[in-house]
Amino acid sequence: MTETATHPTGAFTPPTRFAVPGRIEVDGRVAGAWQTATLVEIRRETPRASTFRLAVPGWAGHVPGQHLMLRLTAPDGYTAQRHYSLASAPDGSGRIELTLDHVRDGEVSGWFHEVARPGDRIEVRGPLSGFFAWPGDRPALLLGAGSGVVPLMSMVRHHRARGLTVPLRMLVSARGPEELIYARELGAETTPVFTRRAPAGTRVGRLGAEHLTPFLADPPAGGWEAYVCGSNSFAEHASRLLVTAGQPVERIRIERFG
């Protein structure tokens, strides 16, 4: 079933096709076409991460949690392609945001952080992947570490922009406050976990069972859909914690990197 709708307030609802409940089928005709995007804004988030806002006139919309393929082409014809999660909520504006860590020796992230300027053009293809997408139809428990917070923030922003009342909570892990991406935007729905440095009076340590217990001991009606995004080690650790705490395995969605 294909659904396209506009919220009574005028907020944009992207076209989505539900293959089975909770799994969003990607429209291959849209996702398969390369489009030209123009960089319109660069915003520093942490010493190592920045947000890059792109104008994509032909963007068909996305669902929070999806990602895109990005392609850079050098003057000699050499190309580099990478997958990046979308950070922005869908709004029908034709503007999307990516938040990238500056990876040492990274071809694409290095170009964005060291060379890119507003007005530069990049090729993008997407949106891609329906498995990790969250259209706002069920309670969501989000667990992220480092730049793994990026697709989760798209969900948080969507939840706020649409004024959704379905429960949403996020736990995000960072080494210290200065490395917490989107720190200025995080609100009451978010619990930060600091693994190395923390403000006075805040416990330092890895995400543990004690962080999940308040949510899984008393889940909302229908239970949580859990979304985990981060490095391989974080994804394994967080998913084990969830299962041990009683979260059904089939209701854990994982995106990992590294």
Image: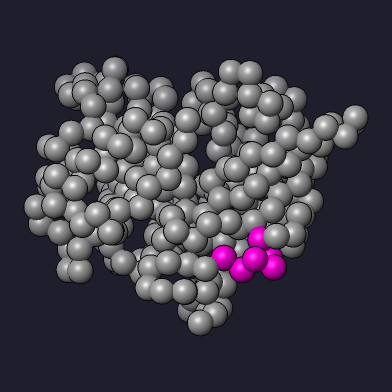
Residue closest to the eye, 75 or 138: 75
Image-quadrant location for residue 236: top left
Coordinates of residue 239 in the picture (x, y in percent): 26, 43
Q: Is residue 224 visible?
A: yes
Coordinates of residue 22 in the picture (x, y in percent): 38, 68
The furthest residue to the left: 217
Coordinates of residue 178 in the picture (x, y in percent): 41, 22
The furthest residue to the right: 76
Residue at 35%, 52% in the rendered image: 253
84 vs 113: above or below: below
108 drawn magenta: no
Q: Is residue 10 visible?
A: no
224 vs 242: above or below: below
172 vs 129: above or below: above
Coordinates of residue 249 in the picture (x, y in percent): 24, 54
Residue at 65%, 35% in the rendered image: 42
240 vs 29: above or below: above
Residue at 83%, 32% in the rendered image: 78
29 drawn magenta: yes
Residue at 68%, 31% in the rendered image: 108
**Coloring applied to the structure:** one colour
Q: Give the residues drawn in magenta, as a range.
A: 26-31
